[in-house]
């Protein structure tokens, strides 16, 4: 980042190239574009698939709100999928139910799979439907199964670099393809300079990649303390499907009491507890409650507790005590 400042380069340039090089080593992709936002990356990925106006795009009801906006801007139709009980993501069963509900053949032409809160769905099962898959691993960076990183199963993958993403660079996104055949479609794109990731953000992302292993270890330590505290409550954790090694992006609890009561109690202890899904499609009211009841229920009663690498020992202990004594 200092290099970018000294050279007075804040537009696209050498730092973006360095970022792509470092990201390629970690994510094992064939080709990548560095863009200004995840929304732009999603729009570009959908355009490359050459979908026709009115065709469906299957998405989880707990996907970010901007998914719906981008899909409608492209004159496509969102097909809302519920999430599996006890998880934060769609399953093969909820996807099939959504496709059957639409009553059209085919109901969707592609699937956008968001790894909500860092939890990765069964990508093999979802990919087996036969539709092209766009993965969003913005919150699941660092989650692996064996040596395979999250984001390796889709035709295209989005890695956001926004404030609430696992790696944050103050804005931006990487759009990449893992295998050479799919990468060919991205190689033909030359983004306008105003759509490319500025060097300032790229330099910050480079630092995030380099510090990721250390930060994830710190997250793991904090999450372990929270987990021990949560075991003494009646509130529930999400289940990571399959054998993925969770990255501890967040520490959510599915509350058995009201969100308002928990927030009020946390405020008394000067701890910020957030609604995990307020900025999702279900949480914002875009998806009718009866359409995806599990997602709607989770949007009302899933709380996020502070978990970030710079959280000190005293603060960690304070939050763990809050979790242990939740109403």
Image (cartoon, rainbow, N blue to C red):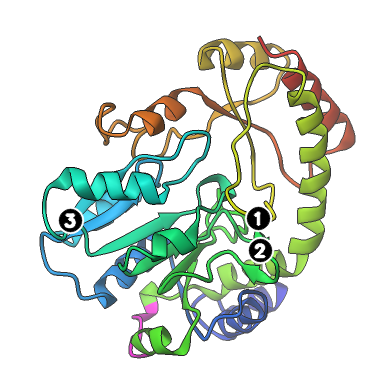
Q: Specify whether residue 172 is in view.
A: no
Q: Secondary structure at mark 1?
A: loop
Sequence-wise first label, 3 or 1: 3
Relative to 170, say whether 235 is above or below.
Answer: above
Of 136 and 295, which appears nearest the observer?
295
Main SS of residues in magenta: loop
Q: Is residue 67 above or below residue 311?
A: below
How many residues crowd mark 3 within 10 Å: few (<14), some (14–19), many (20+)? many
Q: How far is mark 3 from mark 1, CA to CA? A: 31 Å
Task: Label 3, secondary structure: give it.
Answer: loop
The percent position of residue 253, horizontal first and vertical second, equals 61, 28
State yes or no: residue 293 in magenta. Answer: no
Residue 4 visible to an observer of this rendering: yes
**What residue does disc 3 label?**
107
Return the disc, 3 or 2, that comes first in the chain's sequence: 3
Picture residue at 48% right of the left edge, 73% below the top: 197
- Kindly identify which residue carries mark 2: 145
Q: Position of residue 247 (x, y in %)?
A: 68, 53
């Amino acid at each position: 980042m200092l290099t970018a400042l000294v050279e007075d380069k804040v537009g696209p340039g050498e730092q973006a190239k360095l970022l792509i090089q470092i990201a390629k080593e970690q994510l094992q992709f064939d080709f990548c574009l560095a863009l200004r936002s995840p929304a732009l990356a999603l729009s570009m990925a959908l355009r490359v698939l050459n979908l026709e106006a009115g065709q469906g795009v299957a998405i989880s009801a707990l996907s970010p709100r901007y998914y719906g906006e981008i899909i409608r801007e492209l004159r496509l139709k969102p097909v809302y999928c519920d999430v599996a009980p006890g998880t934060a993501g769609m399953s093969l069963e909820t996807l099939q139910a959504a496709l059957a509900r639409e009553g059209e053949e085919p109901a969707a032409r592609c699937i956008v799979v968001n790894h909500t809160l860092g939890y990765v769905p069964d990508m093999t099962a979802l990919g087996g439907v036969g539709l092209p898959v766009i993965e969003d691993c913005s919150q699941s960076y660092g989650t692996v199964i064996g040596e395979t990183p999250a984001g390796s199963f889709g035709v295209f993958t989005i890695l956001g670099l926004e404030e609430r993403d696992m790696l944050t660079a103050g804005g931006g996104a990487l759009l990449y393809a893992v295998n050479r055949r799919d990468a060919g479609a991205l190689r033909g794109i030359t983004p306008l300079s105003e759509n490319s990731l500025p060097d300032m953000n790229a330099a910050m992302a480079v630092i995030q990649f380099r510090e990721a292993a250390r930060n994830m270890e710190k997250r793991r330590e904090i999450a372990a303390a929270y987990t021990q505290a949560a075991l003494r409550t009646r509130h529930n954790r999400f289940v990571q499907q399959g054998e993925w090694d969770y990255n501890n992006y967040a520490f959510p609890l599915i509350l058995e009491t009201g969100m308002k009561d928990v927030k009020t109690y946390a405020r008394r202890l000067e701890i910020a507890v957030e609604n995990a899904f307020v900025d999702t499609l279900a949480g914002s009211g875009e998806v009718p409650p009866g359409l995806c009841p599990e997602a709607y229920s989770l949007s009302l009663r899933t709380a996020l507790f502070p978990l970030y690498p710079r959280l000190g020992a005293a603060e960690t202990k304070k939050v763990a005590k809050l979790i242990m004594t939740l109403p």
